Image: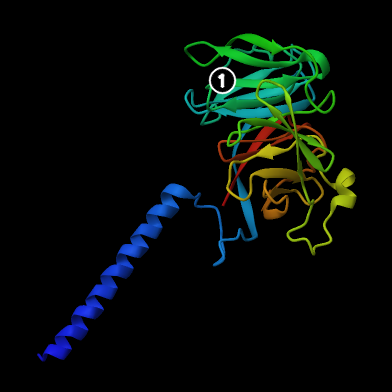
Amino acid sequence: MTRKTMLVLLLALGLCTHAQKRNAANALITAAGEPANTDRNNKGETTFRFVNARKVMEVKIPEGGANGASVVYHPKEKLYYAAQAGNASFPLVIFDESGNVVSPVEQSTLIDIRGLWYNPRTKDIGGNGYAQNGWFSYELDKKGMVESINIFKKGRYQPDDHSPGVLNTEENEVLFLNGLNIDCYTTDGEEKRKTIQLYIGKKTPADAGTGNSFESNYNTRSLIYTGKQGAEIGLLNVTEKQVELYNIKTGYMTRIVKLPLSFKPESFFNFSYSNDTYWVFNKNTRYWIGFREE
């Protein structure tokens, strides 16, 4: 083998090793620094996705309250908490990851609930109530059952009487849907005077959008926070039976999640998200039905 040939072989081997290291590093960055379900183009911009969802769970809610307020997951307890809106005596059903109800039949919400969330910083389940009922947190026993309620801020701290809040865990702020915009509050119930604008049905500024038909085609009360990068905010299009996810920074739609629903979902309440699961409440059968992306 000549000296020239040997140099060419060594150069090729070095380039191959460098490419392997770069690919491995990129894989580590993707695994550790960005959710696997975030798509980006070669400019680093979030791209649009259309995905289907499959049913993964359903839980029957006993009589009491026509509308489902929210389903929240507590990762430490590994339990779900499903609350009915409308009265302090309405059911709060606690169930495990297999859908088995573990709460006593007499367990109630203890407050007329509108919004419910889990705060990973405080490890508490909290929420907001109807009108002047205020903001609260639950005290749990060693088995994860609700032992008592702490109403820490009495009064109306939300856009209107029926507004259900969700927690933006990234910014540690509570979000309320208010028309085509989102109002932001601190976790102490103080208004931040910060508004997030949504461009309903628009993927880009050039799109026509569906904001003009918002009242007739969407759930106008409930929004969800997913924590998915570039697809943080979710609205339920009740006409198309799909969840539309929006970039919290730009306000534009980045993903559609098609739900295999056999019924038309409601235009207020009865829609939630927790533990990578989209929840829709069927008022006729009284089942919370959970869906995950395929």
SS class, disc 1: strand
Q: Residue shown at 60%/21% (left/top)?
A: 125
> Considering only vertical position in the picture, is 52 above or below 273?
below
Quadrant for residue 90, please give it.
top right
Q: Is residue 106 visible?
A: no
Quarter of the image with the N terminus in it: bottom left
Q: Residue shown at 47%/12% (left/top)?
A: 142
> Considering only vertical position in the picture, is 159 above or below 44?
above
On the image, the x and y values in percent for residue 107 come to: 64, 12
In the displayed orientation, state which residue is furthest to the left: 1
> Considering only vertical position in the picture, is 205 above or below 276?
below
Q: Residue shown at 52%/16% (left/top)?
A: 144
Q: Mark 1 = which residue?
A: 124
Quadrant for residue 119, please give it.
top right
Q: Residues within 10 Å of mark 1 (few under 14, many from 20)?
A: some
**Image colouring:** rainbow
On the image, the x and y values in percent for residue 292 come to: 59, 45
Using the image as rendered, state which of residue 272 and residue 22 is in the foreground: 22
Counting every numbered tag in the picture gives 1
Q: In the visual, does 154 lie left or right of 26?
A: right
Using the image as rendered, state which of residue 34 and residue 101 is in the foreground: 34
Q: In the visual, does 111 lie left or right of 119?
A: right
On the image, the x and y values in percent for residue 291 come to: 62, 43
Q: Residue shown at 67%/26% (left/top)?
A: 186
Q: Is residue 195 visible?
A: yes
In the displayed orientation, state which residue is furthest to the front: 193
Amino acid residing under circle 1: Asp
On the image, the x and y values in percent for residue 209 come to: 82, 57
